[in-house]
Image (cartoon, rainbow, N blue to C red):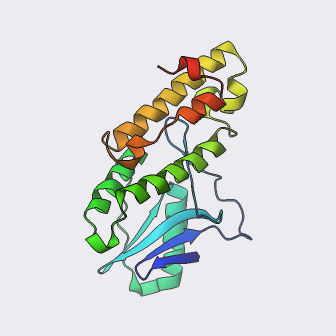
Amino acid sequence: MALRPENRLFWNWLKEPASGPLRKAGRDGNGRFLRTEMDDGAIVLGTLELNGRQLRLQVNSKERAELGRALLQAGLGDLVGTPLTQIMTPAQAMEEREHHGREASPALQIPPEEEARIIGQMLERHYRQVLDEPVPALGDMTPRQAVRTVSGRKKVAAWLKGIENTTARASGGHGAMAAYNFGWMWSELGLSELRK
């Protein structure tokens, strides 16, 4: 298990370069990829957080949860007990992250401007990649492929509106995610006239 520490209580579980492919990336019900990368491009399979006597493994698929649990059990043995499993939708996970982030001690909080910059960079990197990946909501075509037909343009416009609305709702209409401007995607796909 390749772990990269963020601090003494939190680690990122990274895909090891020599390891075989673990499902490329999970997708939510709207065909969006649920994939996180570090600044250096390393793929994050999950996170580990030590909170008092609890060790929390957070991942975005059932398969990763099972693999992570098996690796932790093999490495920690009797130091960990039977795991408690909780399944959340992407929106629930983002909402929990938003609420727990606000409860952090003032010394650990990120200034709102910095948070907006970091989230903006993360979203842009993510969606630039998605533009070139098959999306189930678009008939497993990439958004760039789908916009080549009239019907595809309509589907991509609806998909983009769904992304914008879901992002705004997930953050309660406030915060860095709600402030993110998806206008560049509409322009890059040549759909600015369909954005209402």
Identify the residue at image location x=67%, y=36%: 134
Residue 136 at what x, y percent from top left? 61, 33
- The quarter of the image holding the N terminus is bottom right
- Residue 51, quarter of picture: bottom left
The reply, left or right, for residue 175 in relation to residue 76 is left
Residue in view at x 36 percent, y 62 percent = 111
Vertical comparison of 156 with 129: above or below: above
Q: How many marks overall?
A: 0
- Asked where in the image residue 22 lies, by quadrant, the reply is bottom right
For the view shown, which residue lies furthest in the front direction?
Answer: 113
From the viewer's side, name the closer residue of 112 and 122.
Answer: 112
Question: Is 30 drawn above or below residue 93 in the view shown?
Answer: above
Report the residue that reaches farthest toward the top.
150
Left or right of 112, for residue 31: right
Residue 193: give x, y in percent of width and height: 57, 17
Work out whether residue 52 or residue 160 is closer to the camera in this orientation and state it: 160
Residue 31 drawn above or below residue 88? above
- Can I make out residue 140 in this image? no
Q: Which residue appears at 55% of the width and 76% of the height?
A: 4
Placement of 171 over or under 191, stated as above or below: below
Q: Position of residue 14 (x, y in %)?
A: 59, 69
User: Residue at left 47%, top 30%?
Assistant: 162
Horizontal side, residue 82 vs residue 40: left or right:
left
Residue 58 percent location from the top left of the image: 44, 63
Q: Nearer the viewer, residue 171 or 110?
A: 110
Q: Is residue 83 visible?
A: yes
